[in-house]
Image (cartoon, rainbow, N blue to C red):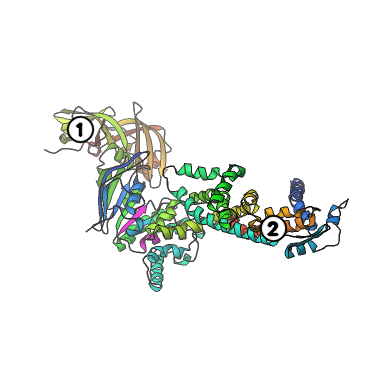
Amino acid sequence: MNQISTLERIIRGVLIALVLVFFLFPIFWILLMSFQNNDQILRIPPSLFFEPTLQNYLALLTGRLETTAGNLDIAFMRNLGNSLLLSTCSVLLSLALGVPAAYAFARYKFRLGENIAFTLLSFRFAPPLLVLLPLSLFFKHLHLTDTYIGLIWVYQLICLPLILWIVRGYFEDISPDIEHAYRISGHGWWKTFRKIAIPLARPGIAAAGLLAFIFAWNNFIFALILASASKQPVTVGALAFVTASGIQYGQIAAAIVLSVTPTLLLALYAQRYLVEGLSLGAVKG
Amino acid sequence: MTSLELRNISKGFKSGKVLEDISLSVKAGEIVVVFGPSGTGKTVLLRMIAGVHYPDTGSIAIDGEDVTDASPEARGVGMAFQNFALFPHFSTFENIASPLEARETPPAKLKEQVGAIARMLKIDHVLGHAPRELSNGQKQRTALARALVAQPKVLLLDDPLRNVDAKLRYEMRLELPRLLRTFNAAVIYVTQDYKEAMALGDHIAVLRNGRIEQWAAPGDVYREPISVDVARLFGDPTINLLPCKLEINGTGSVTLLGRRAPVSGAYAYAAGRDLIAGLRPEHVVVTETAAPDAIPFDLDAVMPVNVRSVLYLRGPKGEELLATVGETEAAKFGRGHRKVWVRFAPSDLLLFDAASGQRIAPQVH
């Protein structure tokens, strides 16, 4: 019995290690690459031992890319700032619109309710290219091309359905009796929404917000078409490293490390909420 | 003074009518038990009084004021839910305090009132705990304290003892009437346990199929149930129901279990109709020896239930009969399977119309 469980433990450990290596090695390799220059990266065979250099990060921070063919200005830090601004504003707007909507869909049955909810979800099915052509024409007409507001608006296609559907599920899990009890105690519906529904759905709202942020952050195609260099996020900005004199692997790696960091930190922070699980046993059964 | 008045309330959902033409009035300090099997709309009725649902027709008045269309927070009722419905992210103290907080009670007074009700319900030592740390009994008391703390004029209790253990349920049955009287509220208490209904109610409204089938004092529902269905719901073990026919030759008699039993001439008006005779198990007399008017039965099993035992009897034509006897008497029968003799007093019979199920009451001219 004991032998089997020891064997089991070893096998399990090996399998977990394999999975971790499979998923984490690329990230680890990118981290190493970000401290190497192009020659070190491209040598054969590759080696784990090298003299680290901060050149890549320096180039990104100063915005000057020095290549054999000459110097090139890049707007990476600006792109990073754009990403942060666009994703944050999009998620905040989506939360402001999506959480009350999710509550309405969870609590009230109204005409065409399910159809509206499904239509919102269907935005996630449609390939972005399908809407991009008409959108770019509209945007030109409305003078929204190359504006933050225009991009944040389009990003709602990504964030809103996600938040709506995740948070709706959490609201549906809260026993309506808890809200009824609060109303009967003498509190209005708005206070009940703020003091009961929102706090109890907080893990769901945190999870949905985080996911929406990551999706918005990783979006490429909307900003590529609808914005110019000064408004573009990192995902589009990274294209600048493919230069006439070659591909700057070192800078790309450093740029990836820098652009992954905010979402990684956010995920680590929000993990607390994600696992908290608020089924606190106040309702029996 | 009538504190709560329901007039001709009807309510239906998509699945069909739930309540039809319910009228009910409760005075301050009175406990009305709404009793009925599950699915008869008891909870819907409470929720309409609380303002969570709205009636299709009819009106609700609290303290003389029409609140039919008022929102729940404007009614000032207290309600304890069957599933407790405590706020999981609030402490016990905050849970109990929430009605006072809504009434903008000053903090010092709020603390004092919460403390007082918590002491009364013996939960003052867990005020700092979160609901998930409480036992079921403590959760139930917290829910009760929350309903009572603001001294509402109308108190709605939705089967509050359903989810607590037997010992606590028994204690609370003794304790609740006294507690509720000190608050002088109009209380509506919903339950599907007839013992609870009889222990707590000043009046009982028996709800069946969306209507109030009988409205009476607890003892009267038991002694004079208005129909076979009410008779069946009230009593454990359930009442024995036997088909019979009423004949009038000079005096009245019913033929029951192959014997003639004389009944009062006051039943004469129901002569010739198919009837059902109801006989409470405690009115069945079981003996080991034959007697002139006794009917031979087979005793199939004896089931001890606390102080009394339930006897399962089978008659000459396979009629089934339940009887209850005292514990010492039951000991004589051993574990059952033997011949016994059964008698009953005809005056203990309850007669019902076989077709409608309605009670045939003796009619005195």
Q: In whole angstroms, how far apart are the C-alphas of marks 1 and 2?
A: 97 Å
**Magenta region:** B146-164
Q: Residue at x 61, y 60 (%)?
A: A85
Going by the numbered disc 2, the residue's amino acid type is Ser
Callout 2: chain:
A
Residue B262: numbered disc: 1
Q: Nearer the viewer, residue A6 or A280?
A: A280
The verdict on residue A50 being magenta is no
Residue A259: numbered disc: 2
Identity of the residue furthest to the right in this view: A44
Callout 1: chain:
B
Going by the numbered disc 1, the residue's amino acid type is Pro
Label 2 sits on a secondary structure element that is helix
Whether residue B258 sits left or right of residue B268 in the image: it is right
- Residue B84 can be seen in this image: no
What x and y, as percent, mark residue B33? 31, 50
What x and y, as percent, mark residue A84? 63, 60
- Residue B107 can be seen in this image: yes
- Quadrant in which residue A205 is drawn: bottom right
Q: Residue at x 43, y 55 (%)?
A: A179
What x and y, as percent, mark residue B31? 29, 55
